Image (cartoon, grey):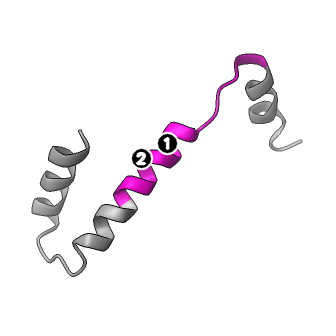
Amino acid sequence: MAHQESILAYFKNRSTNALAENFNSKIKSFRSVFRGVNDIAFFIYRLTLILA
């Protein structure tokens, strides 16, 4: 019952969260390349340049 609305939304509209999952995957792979970054502001700046 807790997930009923999201499950039915797929069958009604064919909508999924695949785009969000793909974006999260890209961020995770980017983080693995730049492991040990101390400057968080620069990391966010690079992330927006590459993924935007």
Label 1–label 2 contact, CB within 8 A: yes
Query: Is 45 drawn above or below residue 3 in the view shown?
Result: below
Assess disc 2: are there few (<14), some (14-19) or many (≥20) residues with their C-alpha within 10 Å of its C-alpha: few
Distance Cα–Cα, label 1 vs label 2: 5 Å
Q: Quadrant of the C terminus?
A: top left
Give the image location of residue 30, x and y in percent: 29, 62
Number of dots carrying numbers: 2
Residues rendered magenta in the picture: 12-27
Q: Which residue is mark 1?
A: 20
Residue 3 as seen in the image, left or right of residue 19: right
Q: Is residue 18 magenta?
A: yes
Residue 30 as seen in the image, left or right of residue 1: left
* Amino acid marked by disc 2: Phe
Residue at the image position 35 percent from the left and 57 percent from the top: 27
Residue at the image position 26 percent from the left and 44 percent from the top: 51
Give the image location of residue 15, x and y in percent: 65, 26
Give the image location of residue 26, x and y in percent: 37, 54
Residue at the image position 19 percent from the left and 47 percent from the top: 50
* Amino acid marked by disc 1: Ala
Give the image location of residue 49, x and y in percent: 15, 45
Q: Give the residue furthest to the right.
A: 1
Q: Which residue is mark 2?
A: 23
Q: Is residue 47 magenta?
A: no
Q: Name the dominant secondary structure of the magenta segment.
A: helix
Residue 30 as seen in the image, left or right of residue 42: right
